[in-house]
Amino acid sequence: MMNKKGNINQLFPAVLALVLVGVLLGAGLMILSSFQTAALNSTGGTTSASIATGNVITSMATLATTWLPIIVVVVAAGIVLAILLGAFGGGKRK
């Protein structure tokens, strides 16, 4: 009988990477929001720095809401396929 423990152990790095990406995106958006607020408050109006920071925030938010769920689904499907192939057909034949 095959040892399925190796396939389950492959879950941890993928889940850890996805969690780290989510946390870093959230922290990055909070920091950029603070920079944009500081740029707006220091001059009393919009500047090129506040506009550029706003554009970066919009781009990162689009990445987080559009591409991150797709990446999560693809990684989850890959893990499920790896487990299924390992359990039913990927093992060594005796």
Image: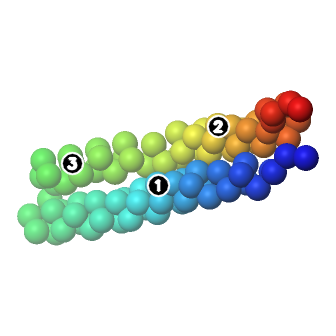
Q: Earlier in the sequence, mark 1 or mark 3?
A: 1
Identify the image's colour scheme: rainbow, by chain, secondary structure or one colour.
rainbow
> Residue at position x 38%, y 65% from top?
27
Residue on which the image places disc 1? 21
Taking the image as shown, residue 21 lies to the left or right of residue 87, namely left
Q: Type of residue at label 1?
A: Val
Q: Position of residue 73 (x, y in %)?
A: 67, 41
- Which numbered mark, 1 or 3, is in the foreground of this view? 1
Q: Type of residue at label 2?
A: Val
| Image quadrant containing the C terminus | top right
Whole-Å distance between the Cαs marked 1 and 3? Answer: 25 Å
Please say if 75 is above or below 39: above
Residue on which the image places disc 2? 74
Q: Earlier in the sequence, mark 3 or mark 2?
A: 3
In depth, the one of 41 and 72 nearer the eye is 72
Taking the image as shown, residue 51 lies to the left or right of residue 66, namely left
**Which disc is residue 51 wearing?**
3
